[in-house]
Image (cartoon, helix red, strand yellow):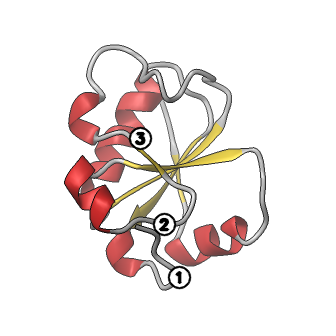
Amino acid sequence: MAQYTSISMDEAKEIFKTPGDYIILDVRRADEFADGHIPGAINVANESIVDKEPVELPDKQQTIYVYCRSGNRSKQASEKLAKMGYTNIIEFGGILDWKGNIEK
């Protein structure tokens, strides 16, 4: 069965303090992303993750940290990506709980 990992927002914030070989993936709509996102994040809307791998995510072994607004869409997107064969998906909730800087 396809699986992903969940961590807390605090754990994610600690990880993001150190640059690394990972992607921060915001799965909200483009307009939500434009209003403000976690620094360094890329945007692929949950609704666009359907039946083929997003071109923005070419490496299925890449560590990908997934978030949305409240934590619902991030779980949906994480499950879909895991089913597509991505092996290092880590879901960490919603930007509503983010206490760090916001980038526009």
Determine contact: label 1, label 2, CB under 8 Å: yes
Alpha carbon separation for disc pair 1 and 2? 8 Å
Which quadrant: the C terminus? Answer: bottom left
Q: Nearer the viewer, residue 67 or 32?
A: 32
The amino acid sitting under disc 1 is Gly
Structural crowding at the residue carrying mark 3, measured as other residues with C-alpha within 10 Å and reported as few (<14), some (14–19) or many (≥20): many
Where is residue 28? Give x, y as percent: 28, 52
Tag on residue 38?
Answer: 2
Say which element carries label 3: helix
The amino acid sitting under disc 3 is Ser
Q: Is residue 54 above or below residue 24?
A: above
Alpha carbon separation for disc pair 2 and 3? 18 Å
Where is residue 72? Give x, y as percent: 26, 56
Tag on residue 22?
Answer: none
The amino acid sitting under disc 2 is Ile
Tag on residue 78?
Answer: 3
User: Which tag, 2 or 3, sits closer to the chain's start?
Assistant: 2
Structural crowding at the residue carrying mark 2, measured as other residues with C-alpha within 10 Å and reported as few (<14), some (14–19) or many (≥20): many
Query: Dividing the picture into quarters, in which one does residue 80 lie?
Result: top left
Where is residue 2? Give x, y as percent: 47, 27
Where is residue 46? Give x, y as percent: 27, 40
Residue at mark 1? 100
